[in-house]
Image: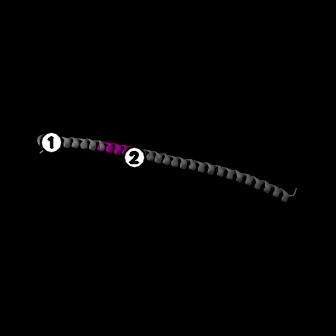
Amino acid sequence: MYTDELLDMLMSITTKQMQSRGNLRREVLLKTTHEVLSKELKEKQQIRKRKWEAMKNDMNKRSRIDTDVEMVDDELIAYHTSCKNICDNHIGLKLSRVMWMKSSVMPEL
């Protein structure tokens, strides 16, 4: 073989080796980049999940507080109503006593 042919073959082999090495480098680079990106994605998903859980817990706490407030409001309204009924009954009883006393003390003319 001629020297030029040998040089061409050697050059071709060297280029193929460099390409395969380049491909290996690219594969390693892509693999490490993929690992880094997937790790970052998992971290962001965990952060998002924690934020969602915190927000959900906060909303649950607020809804519990709201139902407690509604219960307190309902209890206060019921208590007020019962007090009002007692007062009305007491006033009605007093009025009937006063009317009875007036009728018994003052005979009708």
Q: Residue at x 47, y 46 (%)?
A: 56
The three-letter amino acid code for the residue at tag 1 is Ser
Quadrant in which the N terminus appears = bottom right
The region drawn magenta spans: 67-80
Q: Residue at x 30, y 44 (%)?
A: 81
Inspect the image, locate mark 2, and give the three-letter code of the amino acid beneath it. Asp
Q: Nearer the viewer, residue 94 or 10?
A: 94
Name the residue tied to disc 2. Answer: 66
Q: Residue furthest right?
A: 1
Residue drawn at x 71%, y 52% is: 23
| Most distant residue in the bottom direction | 4
Q: Is residue 104 left or right of residue 74?
A: left
For discs 1 and 2, the disc positioned in front in the rendered view: 1
Q: Which residue is mark 1?
A: 103
Residue 73, horizontal then vertical, whole percent: 34, 45
Question: Where is residue 22 drawn, in percent x and y?
Answer: 70, 53
Give how far across and how far down residue 101 sits, in percent.
14, 41
Q: How is the image coloured?
A: one colour
Which residue lies at the image location 79% right of the left edge and 56% below the top edge? 12
Mark 1 / mark 2, whichever is N-terminal: 2
Question: Real-space Cα distance between discs 1 and 2?
Answer: 54 Å
Q: Quadrant of residue 87?
A: top left
Secondary element under disc 1, as helix, strand or loop, is helix
User: In the rendered image, which quarter contains the C terminus?
Assistant: top left
Dot 2 surroundings within 10 Å: few (below 14), some, or many (20 or more)?
A: few
Extreme residue toward the front, this view: 109
Determine crowd level at label 1: few under 14, some 14-19, many 20+ residues with C-alpha closer than 10 A.
few
Residue 38 vs residue 72: left or right? right
